[in-house]
Image: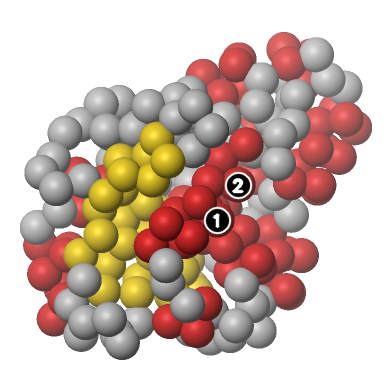
Amino acid sequence: MNDPFLDHPILCSHCLYPWPNRFEEPFFVEGNGFRLGCRYCRVHDDAPTITHFHGNGETVADYIGEFEERIAGLGANLLLAEYRGYGMSSGTPALAAMLEDVELVVTAAGIPAEQIVFFGRSLGSLYALHGAARHPRAAGLIIESGLADALELILVRIEPREVGATAEELRISVQRCLNQREKMAAFTGRVLVMHTRSDGLVPFSHA
């Protein structure tokens, strides 16, 4: 799902903050000209798999160790998804294009939809909710400090003219690719939303 405005280099440089980070035993997912350095920790083949999409300025490596142990303690598998250009991934981050990477991760892991719990933190809520909308029979959806209105936060960082768009054109792009309310309505499974009132990055109103 490419978009000339949401994937514009200026918008992505203002909204996405990739940085390299290495770790042992990556689970690589091949894309078209890039590969994603994910991590897959399996407790049991029949257990639910929490598929986690981290926040901006984070990488998969930030969730190795204690977070993995806590999830394993719940009896669940954990798939830590990575974005293009982050951590051990190649490629260039692109806000809308990376939506299609969700399906790459799910397919590579070979997880039945009924066993997936999509988990998105902050920026990751865009991708977790996209996955849940694509797989309405998934076991669950967890949103932590999620984005309900991506346009609101984009406009804090850029003006539409910087990416060659009018305000209306940018609004239409967000509506087409990042309509969180529409995607939430498409998911019929169990949902947990967590958001602290003191969140300084994504206002509590997004919850």
Give residue 24's position: percent from left, percent from top. 10, 43
Q: How many marks?
A: 2
Residue sitting at x 27%, y 49%: 27
Image position of 198 (left or right of 60): right
Decide which of 153, 40 is in the foreground and name it.
40
Picture quarter with the C terminus:
bottom right
Give residue 110's position: percent from left, percent from top. 42, 67
Residue sitting at x 50%, y 84%: 114
The reply to whether residue 149 is visible in this rendering is yes
Q: Which residue is mark 1?
A: 103
Vertical arrangement, residue 116 with respect to residue 19, above or below: below
Give residue 170's position: percent from left, percent from top. 81, 31
Q: What amino acid type should be assigned to the residue bearing mark 1? A: Glu
The reply to whether residue 206 is visible in this rendering is no
Give residue 99's position: percent from left, percent from top. 60, 46
Q: Which mark is residue 100?
A: 2
Q: State the SS at label 1.
A: helix
Label 1–label 2 contact, CB within 8 A = yes
Q: State the SS at label 2.
A: helix
| Disc 1: CA contacts within 10 A as few (<14), some (14-19) or many (>=20) | some
Q: What amino acid type should be assigned to the residue bearing mark 2? A: Glu
Decide which of 120, 89 is in the foreground and name it.
89
Picture quarter with the N terminus:
top right
Decide which of 184, 28 is in the foreground and name it.
28
Vertical arrangement, residue 118 with respect to residue 10, above or below: below
Residue sitting at x 21%, y 46%: 26
